[in-house]
Image: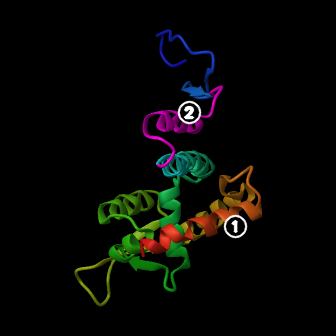
Amino acid sequence: MIGATAVALEPWEVWDAVGRVTSSLPFDPIDEAARQWRSRWGDDPVPAMAAVTSVMRVEQILMARLNALLRPFDLNFPRYEALMLLHFSRRGGLPLGKMGDRLQVHRTSVTNIVDGLERTGLVRRTAHAKDRRSTLAEITERGREVAEAATAVLHDARFGTAPLGDEELSGLTELLRGLREDEG
C-alpha cells in the first residue's frame, strides 16, 4: 500500500508488487457488458461492441506486458517500434515525417518518441542532406545494440502473447487484416 491511507478493497482486488490495486474479477467484464447491452438494445449491436471492447482491452494488456519487458532497456513499446524502424532502414535514418507515416502516429508523437530515444543515446537528430527543412532521426551504434537485445527479450516472451499459440496468432492477424486494409 502506498502512503498511510487505508483503503477498503473489494474481495477480488489485491495489491500488486508496486502498491497498485489490481483486480482479478470473478466474472468476465466483456460478457457482463454484452449482457447489459443485450438487455437494453437487443442482440444486433452486441457482437460489434464485444469485439471492439475485447480488442481495446487486449491492447491495454499487451502494452503493459511489452512495456514491462522493455523497461530494463529504458524503452516503451512506441520507442521500441521507432528504434526498430530506424534499425531496419537502409541508411539507419529517416525523416521524422516519414517515421510518423510508417508508425501511423501524429508528428507530435514522433517528436516525443525521438526526444526520448535521443535522451538515452539511442538516436541522434541530424540535418537532411538534400532538404534543409527536414530533420532526420538516425540510430546510433548503442541504439543498434539495444534494439538487438530488446528484440531477443521480446522473442523469448513471444511479444507477451501467452497463452495464444502460433495458429491462433496467425488466425488473429488474418482476422484483423480486413480492418487494416479498409483503413489503407
Q: Which residue lies furthest to the bottom in this view?
A: 130
Q: Verify whether residue 91 appears in magenta.
A: no
Please tell me which residue lies in front, 127 or 56: 56
Q: Dot 1: few (<14), some (14–19), or many (≥20) neighbours within 10 Å? A: few
Q: Give the residue drawn at x 72%, y 54%.
A: 157
Residue tagged 1: 170
Determine whether label 2 and label 1 are within 8 Å by CB.
no
Q: Is 128 displayed left or right of 160 in the figure? A: left
Percent position (x, y) of residue 105? Answer: 38, 64
Span highlighted in magenta in the image: 24-44
Q: Which mark is residue 70?
A: none
Q: Quick check: can you spot residue 99? A: yes
- Residue drawn 59% across and 37% down? 31
- Amino acid type of disc 2? Glu
Label placed on residue 32: 2
Q: Give the left or right position of residue 129, taking residue 68 as reference.
A: left
